[in-house]
Amino acid sequence: MLKSKIGGIGYYVPERVVTNEDLAKVMDTSDEWIQERTGIKERRYAKKHVETTSTLGANAAKIAIERAGITPADVDFIIFATLSPDYYFPGSGVLLQRELGMQGIGALDIRNQCSGFVYGLSIADQFVKSGMYKNVLLVGAECHSFGLDFTTRGRNVTVIFGDGAGAVVVQPTEKEGQGILSSHLHADGDHAEHLAYINPGCHGGKHLGTEKYGFPEDDQSFGGAFLTPTMWDNEDYYPNMNGQFVFKFAVTKFPEVIMEALKTNGYTPEDLSLLVPHQANLRIAQFVQKRLRLRDDQVYNNIQKYGNTTAASIPIALCEAWEAGKVKEGDLVCLAAFGSGFTWASSLIRW
Ligand code: UT7
């Protein structure tokens, strides 16, 4: 049976480095607290009015396309994973398509937050395995820096996140044993609000800009689309996280979904060449490593440099590992993610 492989991979992070000390200048936090609790030393922020989620994604995509040995004209389909799109709608997939001059092909945006890349990979895999497409471009990109609360109120969330993008081209392979072996996707909406960006949204009568433009008296609200001064003061208009609750779930679900992928294919943690976990928190990755008794060389982390880049974190880390020669043909690679939704997922690949 036809299988699919990652035929090209690339990543792009903005030039601007923001250190923990930089954040400590605008909110009550410290380098010591951030490093001790998360392992993060610095992150990148996109250049305002110049870079957006789709432009970061396009930069990563260009590299992936070139490394796959194709041109943008050869791409059959785009999948774009992000929780920080350029616009509320349309999605960033069509903007990336325009930027790379690939008009006409389908562009699918997916909203699975930290699990977005692994969910997207499973979709690309199905299209390629079925023979429908030969070159599927999958992008995970985020511009968190434009939507964070830089007051002390938001410090538990803001210090974690960074901007960046990663991309892969998924192609067919007929090489014996090679390719994506299986994908495992999960979600539990019971905990949706424990890690969420609640507004703007249409729940509870609060729709885009209602507070400024709506008619509170008769409930006939209509949208204004931008954050108004009243919104800036409302913590619902920023990402919120119940950190400890999320942490506890993450350290249970990561090992579970990794073991699910290994067991499905008759492997054990010892067989893994490399685990590339979503870069949520270095402490989470270390916990998972210990639980699965993996050696240091079996796990790749780079959250120290980039923070948590949500849908972009896995392709950025995978690409860095690949560039460093830590992912070679024949290696058994596991990608695993957990995040808002809650959603969690894994993918096992024979490179
Ligand atoms: O990628 C999506 C999935 N996300 C995750 O997996 C994140 C999971 N959660 C975490 O990584 C951790 O919960 C955090 C790193 C977010 C927070 O660490 P924590 O050890 O759970 O801290 P906490 O939220 O329980 O807060 C402990 C204390 C509080 O002060 P008090 O109440 O003890 O006085 C916070 O106000 O630390 C305070 N705090 C901070 N202090 C300095 C929270 N954030 C900061 C900060 N700097 N940035």
Image (cartoon, grey):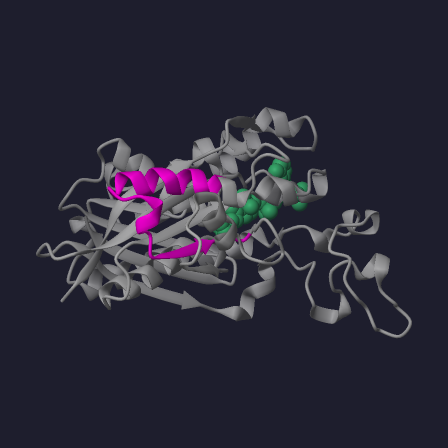
User: Can you tell which quarter of the image residue 58 is in?
Assistant: top left
Q: Position of residue 291 (x, y in %)?
A: 31, 51
Q: Residue shown at 56%/65% (left/top)?
A: 192
**Residue range of the region highlighted in magenta in the rendering:** 56-83
In the image, taking residue 228 as reference, residue 68 lies left or right, namely left
- Quadrant assignment for the N terminus: bottom left
Query: Residue drawn 60% across and 45% down?
Result: 157
Q: Is residue 191 above or below residue 218?
A: above
Residue occupying image coordinates x 27% and y 33%:
323
Residue 14, position in %: x, y?
50, 32
Would you say 98 lies left or right of 181 here? right
- Give the quarter the ligand 1 occupies: top right
**Residue furthest to the left:** 176
Q: Position of residue 184 (x, y in %)?
A: 32, 64
Residue 326 within the magenta-colored segment of the rendering: no
Is 65 within the magenta?
yes
- The image quadrant of residue 259 is bottom left
Q: Which residue is pictured at 66% across the width and 60% down the height?
A: 198
Foreground residue among 125 and 307: 125
- Apparent side of residue 4 relative to residue 62 in the rendered image (left or right): left
Q: Position of residue 47 (x, y in %)?
A: 59, 32
Q: Nearer the viewer, residue 321 or 273?
A: 321
Q: Is residue 215 visible?
A: yes
Q: Where is 302 relative to 53, above or below?
A: above
Tell me if residue 155 comes above or below residue 209 in the rendering: above
The answer to whether residue 310 is visible is: no
